[in-house]
Amino acid sequence: MPINYYIFLSIALFCIGVAGVLTRRNAIIIFMCIELMLNAVNLLLVAFSKMHHAAMQVTNPNAGIDGQIFVFFIMVVAAAEVSVGLAIISMMYRNTHSVDVNFLNRLKH
Amino acid sequence: MSKIVYLVPLFPLIGFLLNGLLRKSLSKSLAGVIGCGVLLASFVVSLVIFLDVRKEGFEPIIVNLFDFIHTGKINIPFAFQVDQLSVLFMLIITGVGFLIHLYSTSYMHEESSQHYARYFSYLNLFVFSMLLLVMGANFVIMFIGWEGVGLCSYLLIGYWFKNIDYGNAAKKAFIMNRIGDVGFLIAIFWMFSQFGSANFVEVFSKTPSTSTSILTGITLLLFVGATGKSAQIPLYTWLPDAMAGPTPVSALIHAATMVTAGIYMIARANIMYTLAPTTQTVVAVIGLATAILAATIAIKQNDIKKVLAYSTVSQLGYMFLGLGVGAYTGAVFHVMTHAFFKALLFLGAGSVIHAMHGEQDIRKMGDLKKHLPITHITFLLACFAIAGIPPFSGFFSKDEILAAAYEKSPAYYIIGVAGAMMTAFYMFRLYATTFLGSFRGTSQQKNALHESPAAITIPLIILAILAVIGGFVGIPEVIKPNSHLLGEYLNPIFSLSAKVQGPHEVHASTEWMLMAVSAGLALIAVIFAWGRFSKNPELGEPQGLGKILANKWYVDELYEAIIVRPINALAKFFNNVMEKSIIDWIVNGVGRLVQYGSRQIRLLQSGQVGGYVLLMVIGLVLLFIVQLFLKKM
């Protein structure tokens, strides 16, 4: 499969994520959109890694491996982020009985 | 010898520090002992140096203490120069200064001990600065001393600072001196750019190969400094006002030492002046004009110290005349004799004021010779000396200047003699009104009249002896050949100038005649004044020309009208208009701009997380665009 497909899919996912973050007010959906953006990037990394590996397999059997290792790092960070983020959101719900981010604008004052 | 040179200014500095810092705990007698003792020590050291300098084959010594300013190509050492001229001035300053300190111990005894010590610390600081001025080996060190004496004169004139008039007189002296100092300072900068140094040795060795126009500029600027410090037209009006200080201060600062700083400076730079004839003419004309103007004013003054103050201005004019016509030795000679008799006159006047309990108006005195015998005799001798009656000291020095003036132009001589006549006249008007006739004060004052204590009379007697015999160190060639000791002594300093000027051309018989004319006219003036004022002193208010003279030609009023008032008006304009409507507007405007700007920007912080994220995304997209498209250009 040509690399362009992966790239367009990744861009589409990323844009959906951005649009979701910008437009939605529900904290959980925003959270999910952020995850979507992260995974769009992961997809791209894996795709490029595979492409490099296929192109340079003869001269360098390890080519493109670092892209995949990077994906693991991102997944670990995302897991940590999810645990912290969900904890914050559940605390937020306990205090305000709402997960609407616009409701929490008291930092302004 | 060079090992002990630094002691001369060090002693007064120590005295200043001790008296100044411990003024609250020192007793009066201790403060007096410290004040006088350091001066005596300085005088003894100066005397030792003087004896060394007198020896055969003496070469000027430069004592380098440390590098004062060392930057780039400019090196200004903190160095003292010891040669005939500086040692002579050191002797005058410490010698006459010591007598005046001694006198002060008695004159100031009514002050509280704290102020008494303050007074002596100022006096010591003054002597220190003056010594720095005459001992410095370059113009910068000289300038430090120059500013130091200006500061001390301010402090001492305003010694009784609770009196607003005295404070104003002090400010006037300080500001007028500053005007002159600017000229001096510019001259120093010019010398740095021209000669690359301000050391006397280097500057004077490069002087002969410098163009006349540059020398004229530098010397004129130096002369501006001299007019400020030595009270010449147009900056002389501070000196008479400076009489606000205690009388010994007038004697020390405004007669014997500080005002001679300008003379010293020009005598030191004599070669520059000799090679700039235009400046010499300016110096001579200004000196002569000051001599005459001050003499005319002195004729109608009724304050004993004001008469002496104007006579100081007038005598300084003679010294500048001497410098202007190239009679450097004569000018220095007159500095020396003037230091003796003018210090004596001021101290005598102080003794009179002391006896009269602060009364300074001579119209309320008279017949004091019975009550103050020692003061009377010494004052009379000083009057003879300043009037130029032979064989008193003033005759020799004034005659030397006048003879040199005649050689340059007979017009100088005629005007100079007219001034000398006026000097004799007003001095004996002062003498006759004060000491002769009948007593015109209150009976209370009369009963309290008394001769002053020994601490006052001893300096008077010593100075009187010096005022009488001081002239014999400079007997003119025509009276007795090869007996001008001072001339021989100072010869190494002025030899280069003498070579440029060429030999003297006045015939011996002419010189005899000049001497006879000036002495005879002075004598006539003395007899006339004596006869006129001993019986019928001027008591009423003067009319006509006399009124103009009594009001000092209205020079102060003129300065007030053309300088002080416009500057005050300008200052008021800046204060009311520029300050309030322009400067304040700018400052407030900056504040308002910041407030307005921050109020607008604050709107961005809405608290809506979505808004922040949107801005973040826009920012990222912009960076992305910049990275992708603009980088290629």
Image: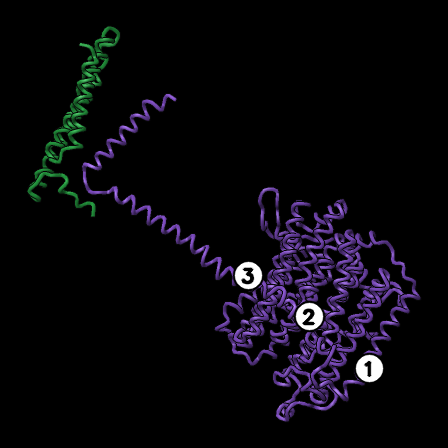
In terms of secondary structure, where does tag 3 sit? helix
Query: Compared with residue B29, is residue B449 higher up or lower down, i.e. above or below?
Result: below
Residue marked by disc 3: B570
Residue B342 at least partly seen: yes
Residue B255 badge: 2
Q: Residue at image x 69%, y 56%?
A: B222
Query: Compared with residue B122, is residue B505 higher up or lower down, i.e. above or below?
Result: above
Q: Chain of mark 1?
A: B
Where on the picture, by quarter, is residue B318?
bottom right
Of mark 1 and mark 3, the one earlier in the sequence is: 1
Where on the picture, by quarter, is residue B469?
bottom right
Question: Residue B549 at x, y = what percent?
Answer: 72, 75
State how far apart marks 1 and 3 are (Cα): 50 Å
Q: Chain of mark 3?
A: B
Q: Amino acid at mark 1?
A: Phe
**Front of the two marks 2 and 3:** 3
Q: How is the image coloured?
A: by chain
Q: Residue at image x 18%, y 17%?
A: A46
Residue marked by disc 1: B528
Query: Compared with residue B598, is residue B567 higher up or lower down, i.e. above or below?
Result: below
In terms of secondary structure, where does tag 1 sit? helix
Chain letter for the purple part:
B
